[in-house]
Image: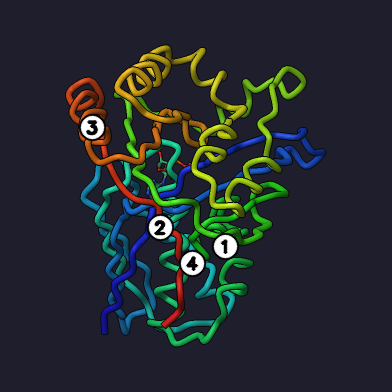
């Protein structure tokens, strides 16, 4: 028996860090939305009690370090599953890019294994299990658009943002999220208007979504990697309505309404960056089938 699952990337329409907690995590307020750029996971049932990861991407570990492996391992332990699984990951999301590729693979593995191993869990239960793997995994279990608080694991669903193009440009570098948080001085940041972004999304106002985009991690990554700023400037020059770095970067995304401007930005940035994508936001939450 085989199950195929899609693992879409996310972008942060806004990302705020409120303070550092006693447990070492940062208290955050993030507005995230899934986009139509996805890894594909093929889960094959094994009679043998083992977890196998097959990945042809040299940046993706094929052992217990893989977040999809950790998802399978957690479910197996928790529900005493005696069957095994072979997980083949077809990677489309750039790695260490601020797009939560690993977290989304883990979330997709949770959704897919729920079906393959016939566990009968709800999305809420899967999201709860996901928090043990990483802060972004619970959001990725649901998908759609949400406000994430706490260390990122508390999810409040929001409506889909207004339809537009999202152009993503990744420079030729990877960024470690832990490193960016370590360098962040929470006292010095300029906080984005999270409430304003929620209002903009609820009102379906594209202009207000553009106006309220903000990410406190941007300056930290820009200081380490000036090429991120160059990409931001170019996207603006080619006509993006708003431009922001996603997560801890280094991927930059721009929003545009019109097809013609999307093509101009896409073509203008290709060759200058490692990877460029033009995609839509995915408004819908995942469903269990
Ligand atoms: P985030 O936006 O959540 O901070 P990211 O998009 O910046 O994450 P990932 O692509 O998830 O970063 O990769 C970060 C690291 O996680 C990689 O360097 C890789 O070693 C490890 N990793 C573990 N499992 C996976 C996976 N399934 N896909 C990609 N990377 C993985």
Dot in front, 4 or 3: 3
SS category of the residue bearing label 4: loop
The span from disc 2 to disc 4 (Cα, nearest Å) is 8 Å
For the residue carrying disc 3, how many other residues have a C-alpha within 10 Å: few (<14), some (14-19), or many (20+)?
Answer: some
For the residue carrying disc 2, how many other residues have a C-alpha within 10 Å: few (<14), some (14-19), or many (20+)?
Answer: many
Dot in front, 1 or 3: 3
The span from disc 2 to disc 1 (Cα, nearest Å) is 21 Å
Q: Which residue occupies the foreground of this view, 68 or 105?
A: 105
Q: Left or right of 75: which side holds 19?
A: right
Q: Left or right of 123: which side holds 110?
A: left
> What residue sits 61% from the left and 59% below the top?
132
Occupied quadrant, residue 189: top right
Residue occupied by mark 4: 285
Q: Left or right of 19: which side holds 130?
A: left
Q: Which mark is residue 282?
A: 2
Quarter of the image where ligand 1 sits: top left
Q: Are marks 2 and 1 in contact (CB under 8 Å)?
A: no
Q: Earlier in the sequence, mark 4 or mark 3?
A: 3
Image location of residue 65, percent across then percent down: 44, 50
């Amino acid at each position: 028996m085989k199950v195929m699952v899609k693992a879409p990337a996310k972008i942060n329409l806004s990302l705020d860090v409120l303070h550092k907690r006693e447990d070492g995590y940062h208290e955050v307020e993030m507005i995230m939305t899934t986009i139509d750029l996805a890894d594909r996971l093929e889960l094959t049932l094994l009679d043998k009690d083992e977890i196998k990861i097959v990945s042809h991407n040299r940046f993706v570990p094929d052992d217990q370090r893989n977040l999809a492996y950790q998802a399978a391992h957690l479910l197996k332990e928790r529900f005493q599953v005696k069957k095994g699984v072979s997980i083949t990951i077809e990677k489309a999301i750039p790695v260490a890019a601020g797009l939560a590729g690993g977290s989304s693979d883990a979330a997709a593995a949770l959704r897919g294994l729920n079906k393959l191993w016939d566990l009968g869990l709800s999305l809420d239960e899967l999201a709860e299990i996901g928090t043990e793997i990483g802060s972004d995994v619970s959001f990725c279990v649901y998908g759609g658009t949400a406000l994430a608080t706490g260390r990122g694991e508390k999810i409040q669903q929001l409506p889909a943002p207004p339809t537009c193009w999202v152009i993503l440009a990744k420079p030729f570098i990877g960024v470690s999220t832990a490193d960016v948080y370590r360098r962040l001085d929470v006292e010095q940041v300029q906080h984005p208007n999270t409430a304003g972004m929620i209002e903009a999304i609820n009102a379906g106002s594209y202009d207000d979504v553009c106006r309220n985009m903000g990410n406190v991690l941007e300056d930290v990554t820009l200081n380490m990697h000036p090429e991120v700023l160059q990409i931001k400037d170019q996207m603006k020059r080619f006509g993006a309505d708003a431009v922001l770095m996603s997560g801890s970067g280094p991927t930059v995304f721009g929003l545009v309404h019109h097809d013609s401007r999307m093509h101009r930005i896409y073509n203008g940035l290709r060759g200058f960056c490692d990877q460029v994508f033009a995609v839509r936001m995915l408004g819908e939450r995942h469903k269990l089938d």
